[in-house]
């Protein structure tokens, strides 16, 4: 008999995840304009400032995995969620760039904890036999937020709505999300004997090869989420770039409906390979938009948004597979560590993408930045075939 996946707690944590990411994604495409218009920051400075968030998150992730494997998970989840929420209010009080950076760093620390704890708790409350499917639906909440948040943020910005109101929308969403998180019921986790401090308590060593391949894939993703609106404006695309995020999220949502089930059937490595190749083709195509727009603006615009849809499909296929791969390399007592290693790899790449993308755009153009990112995906695919897959097949525990 198939075990039940949908429970009240599962639905609540999905709602909490959606609202958290909606608040997050609402600001993602707006912050570069905010820093440029309010503080007069250049592209290189914007990349460095925005990456503070990611650097702080990735610094927190290994410690959060250790804490979640050692202590009760829900109190840590609620504490991190509360701190994450309050930082949106902090942005409204930041009258100087220094204060903004400080709040950005604190926000990153809390994000690093809340994402690992939420991801670990959802694994705890779902049946193991439906983990890939369950993680797929859980991630679908992120994708739905990604489809609505950036479009809403850009719409508010283009409608000349004040930044204080935009930050308030993010704050309100996360307050509702915190209430949903508070109502989640988690299974009892007996006290565990703390192991001596060692590297493998903070990083899943068996997951490092997969982490490297995921990191390389996330570098151009970081460029895209933060700079695609500026890239479109730079090359002359006049259509609302909010739809780019919407189509990307639709692609992720559609692919998650079947990719999780394929993962549960044991096709983890096949799914990762397929998604990686599709993502690689999409980033080369995104870079090509900077050249072909001189031939036809309407055709390039259609091509630009088609890329967004296919890019979403590629990443939507990979996410549940990568997440399950990391979990399957770890014993149950290290679920938090496995999850934090998976998310740390992702965040490191996004942080590099923010900095490198801004720097390349400053000295050249965004189309060259995306070309560099596309080349990195080729390196990742080669590493997946040569190292990641053989390593996983040899060391997996389930």
Image (cartoon, rainbow, N blue to C red):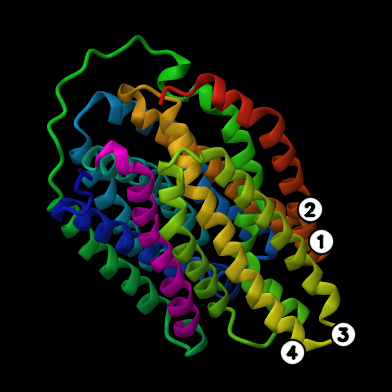
Where is mark 3, residue-wise? 295
State whether residue 152 appears in this view. Answer: yes
Q: What secondary structure is found at the residue carrying circle 1?
A: helix
State whether residue 58 appears in this view. Answer: no
Q: CA distance from mark 3 to mark 1?
A: 18 Å
Q: What secondary structure is found at the residue carrying circle 4?
A: helix
User: Nearer the observer, disc 1 or disc 4?
Assistant: 4
Looking at the picture, tell me which residue is in the foreground, 323 or 255. Answer: 255
Circle 1 Cα neighbour tier, 10 Å, few/some/many (<14 / 14–19 / ≥20): some
The residue lying at 27 percent from left, 50 percent from top is 81
Looking at the picture, tell me which residue is in the foreground, 159 or 350. Answer: 350
Q: Is residue 337 left or right of residue 369?
A: left
Q: In x, y percent, where is residue 52?
A: 53, 49
**Residue 130: in magenta span:** yes
User: Nearer the observer, disc 4 or disc 2?
Assistant: 4
Where is mark 2, residue-wise? 372
Q: Is residue 343 left or right of residue 303?
A: left
Q: In x, y percent, where is residue 387?
A: 67, 28
Where is mark 4, residue-wise? 298
Q: Counting residues from the N terminus, which is met first, the one under dot 2 or under dot 3?
A: 3
Q: Are marks 1 and 2 in contact (CB under 8 Å)?
A: yes
Where is mark 1, residue-wise? 368
Q: In x, y percent, where is residue 199?
A: 47, 17
The residue lying at 16 percent from left, 20 percent from top is 191
User: Nearer the observer, disc 2 or disc 3?
Assistant: 3
Q: CA distance from mark 1 to mark 2?
A: 6 Å
Looking at the picture, tell me which residue is in the foreground, 13 or 322. Answer: 322
Question: Which secondary structure type mostly characterizes the magenta part of the structure?
Answer: helix
């Amino acid at each position: 008999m198939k075990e039940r996946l949908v429970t009240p707690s599962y639905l609540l944590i999905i709602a909490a995840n959606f609202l958290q990411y909606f608040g997050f994604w609402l600001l993602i495409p707006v912050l570069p304009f905010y820093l440029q218009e309010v503080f007069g920051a250049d592209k290189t400075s914007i990349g460095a400032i925005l990456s503070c968030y990611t650097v702080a998150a990735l610094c927190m992730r290994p410690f959060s995995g250790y804490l979640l494997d050692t202590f009760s998970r829900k109190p840590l989840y609620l504490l991190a969620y509360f701190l994450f929420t309050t930082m949106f209010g902090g942005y409204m009080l930041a009258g100087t760039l220094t204060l903004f950076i400080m709040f950005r760093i604190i926000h990153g620390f809390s994000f690093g904890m809340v994402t690992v704890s939420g991801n670990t708790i959802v694994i705890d409350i779902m049946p193991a036999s439906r983990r890939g499917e369950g993680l797929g639906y859980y991630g679908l909440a992120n994708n739905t937020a990604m489809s609505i948040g950036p479009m809403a943020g850009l719409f508010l910005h283009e409608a000349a709505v004040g930044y204080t109101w935009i930050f308030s929308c993010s704050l309100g969403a996360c307050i509702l999300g915190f209430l949903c998180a508070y109502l989640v019921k988690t299974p009892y986790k007996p006290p565990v004997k703390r192991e001596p401090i060692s590297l493998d308590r903070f990083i899943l060593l068996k997951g490092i090869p997969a982490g490297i391949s995921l990191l390389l894939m996330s570098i151009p993703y970081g460029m895209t989420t933060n700079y695609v609106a500026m890239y479109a404006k730079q090359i002359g695309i006049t259509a609302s770039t909010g739809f780019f995020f919407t189509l990307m999220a639709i692609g992720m949502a559609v692919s998650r409906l079947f990719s999780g089930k394929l993962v549960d059937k044991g096709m983890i490595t096949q799914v990762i390979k397929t998604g990686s190749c599709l993502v690689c083709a999409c980033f080369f195509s995104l870079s090509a938009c900077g050249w072909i727009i001189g031939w036809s603006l309407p055709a390039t615009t259609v091509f630009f948004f088609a890329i967004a849809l296919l890019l979403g499909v590629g990443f939507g296929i990979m996410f549940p597979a990568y997440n399950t791969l990391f979990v399957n390399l770890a014993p149950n007592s290290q679920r938090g560590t496995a999850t934090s290693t998976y998310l740390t790899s992702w965040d490191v790449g996004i942080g590099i993408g923010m900095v490198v993308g801004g720097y390349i755009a400053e000295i050249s153009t965004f189309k060259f930045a995306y070309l560099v990112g596309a080349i990195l995906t080729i390196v990742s695919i080669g590493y997946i075939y040569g190292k990641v897959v053989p390593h996983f097949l040899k060391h997996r525990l389930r």
